[in-house]
């Protein structure tokens, strides 16, 4: 499905382009909806519609949260779902759309024991208020069930329309801007070297990386409208890239830092990204994840990525990323967050195996990875 991506402010947008039905479920953040300025504009633009607002869900959405949202709708009638916020409102809105027309227990679809059927009664519009997750342009969503994290992938999860209004990101703090910026950068880089990469996905990645390397630092420390616009566009491009390829090893391992130490996702993946530049650059014939891809091809892609960062080698890319973390006000030393030697076994066993399979190099050499984390 081709998305209708509209780059303009909500105030200037002709809402007829969005084909909003008479009944609207508005899925929003608790504070960000008002703080971003979206509430004041949408309350006017949606006058005359039957609008239900839903924000009663956790930042890491639980399946029961999604079911609460589903129960607010008359599922037999046409509905428009509008998601306004960061990654959590986006995921909740996507899941409500996908699960609301299914006939069986929603948990069955999350576990993968039943196949989803398409929902033609509901259209989904995404309006991000952050510049990082790229969730507005992906066909997967995260949900927690019985304390376990699941990622549901289905084409219906991809919003039909996206509104990119950079003015909604003005209330992001420097720390939030840094974290979401590194999330977008990691998505773009990982998509580029993913075994599922294509000319199209790498095109999105190249453009995203160019925008991020030019604008992230100023977006964190002294943002102007050009920086905000560039970072929002970059996040969307990175989302479009991983929509085609999914993420790889840096994302697969970063969840440990978030779940055990509360490190925000973007910061966590930023801490690991440089390490996997080095790790993946040392690929061999035996360690390839994809036997149809040559070692030379993988190394050339990594070198292309290095050049996009202004580096000439994987080690230089690692140095550049650590420096960028510090300049953005983020800790760059994993050893100051976790005890690497004591916790490595738990860290390694926590990996998201599904994401790991997309990495160009098999992650089997635990000693090498341990030494890279300590370097």
Image (cartoon, rainbow, N blue to C red):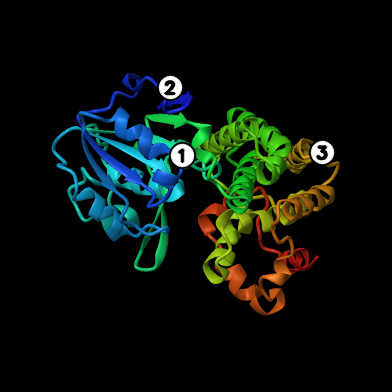
Q: Mark on residue 12?
A: 2
Q: Position of residue 206 (x, y in %)?
A: 67, 32
Residue 293 picture location, percent across and down: 67, 40
Q: Which residue is mark 3?
A: 310
Relative to 270, does residue 47 appear above or below in the rendering?
A: above
Quadrant that contains the N terminus: top left
Q: Earlier in the sequence, mark 3 or mark 2?
A: 2
Q: Residues within 10 Å of mark 3 (few under 14, many from 20)?
A: few
Q: Picture coordinates of residue 216 (x, y %)?
A: 68, 41
Left or right of 323? Residue 215 is left
Cα separation between marks 3 and 2: 38 Å
N-terminal-most mark, 3 or 1: 1
Q: Nearer the viewer, residue 244 or 295?
A: 244
Q: Is residue 6 left or right of residue 177?
A: left
Question: Dot 1 corresponds to which residue?
Answer: 128
Q: Nearer the viewer, residue 87 or 39?
A: 39
Residue mark closest to the camera, 3 vs 1: 1
Query: Which marked residue is nearer to the observer: mark 3 or mark 2?
Result: 2
SS at circle 2:
loop
Asked if residue 295 lies left or right of residue 270, the reply is: right
The Cα atoms of the two marked residues, 1 and 2, are separated by 16 Å
Q: Residue 326 is drawn in which quadrant?
A: bottom right
Q: Residue at x 48, y 24 (%)?
A: 8
Q: Position of residue 335 (x, y in %)?
A: 72, 70
Query: In the rendered structure, which disc, 1 or 2, sits on the residue that comes first in sequence?
Result: 2
């Amino acid at each position: 499905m081709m998305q209708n991506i509209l780059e303009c402010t909500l105030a200037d947008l002709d809402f007829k382009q969005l084909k909003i039905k008479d009944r609207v479920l508005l899925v929003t953040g608790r504070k960000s909806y008002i703080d971003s300025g979206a509430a004041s504009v949408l309350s006017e633009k949606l006058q005359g519609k039957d609008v239900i607002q839903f924000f009663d869900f956790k930042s890491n959405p639980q399946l029961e949260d999604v079911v609460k949202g589903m129960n607010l709708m008359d599922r037999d009638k046409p509905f428009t779902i509008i998601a306004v916020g960061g990654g959590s409102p986006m995921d909740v809105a996507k899941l409500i759309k996908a699960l609301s027309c299914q006939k069986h227990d929603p948990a069955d679809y999350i576990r993968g024991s039943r196949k989803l059927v398409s929902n033609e009664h509901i259209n989904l519009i995404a309006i991000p208020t952050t510049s990082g997750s790229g969730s507005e342009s992906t066909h997967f969503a995260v949900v927690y069930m019985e304390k376990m994290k699941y990622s549901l992938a289905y084409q219906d999860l991809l919003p039909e329309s996206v509104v990119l209004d950079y003015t909604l990101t003005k209330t992001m703090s420097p720390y939030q801007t840094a974290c979401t910026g590194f999330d977008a950068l990691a998505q773009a880089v990982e998509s580029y070297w993913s075994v599922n990469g294509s000319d199209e996905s790498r095109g999105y990645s190249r453009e995203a990386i160019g925008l991020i390397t030019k604008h992230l630092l100023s977006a964190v420390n002294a943002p102007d409208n050009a920086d905000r616009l560039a970072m929002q566009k970059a996040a969307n491009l990175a989302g479009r890239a991983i929509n085609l390829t999914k993420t790889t090893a840096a994302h697969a391992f970063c969840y440990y830092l978030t779940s055990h130490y509360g490190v925000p996702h973007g910061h966590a993946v930023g801490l690991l990204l440089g390490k996997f530049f080095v790790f993946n650059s040392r690929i061999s014939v035996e360690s390839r994840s994809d036997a149809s891809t040559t070692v030379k091809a993988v190394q050339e892609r990594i070198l292309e990525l290095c050049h996009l960062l202004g580096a000439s080698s994987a080690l230089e890319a690692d140095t550049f990323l650590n420096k960028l973390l510090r300049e953005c006000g983020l800790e760059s030393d994993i050893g100051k967050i976790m005890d690497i030697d004591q916790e490595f076994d738990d860290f390694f066993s926590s990996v998201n195996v599904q994401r790991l399979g997309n990495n160009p190099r098999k992650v089997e050499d635990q000693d090498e990875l341990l030494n890279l984390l300590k370097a």
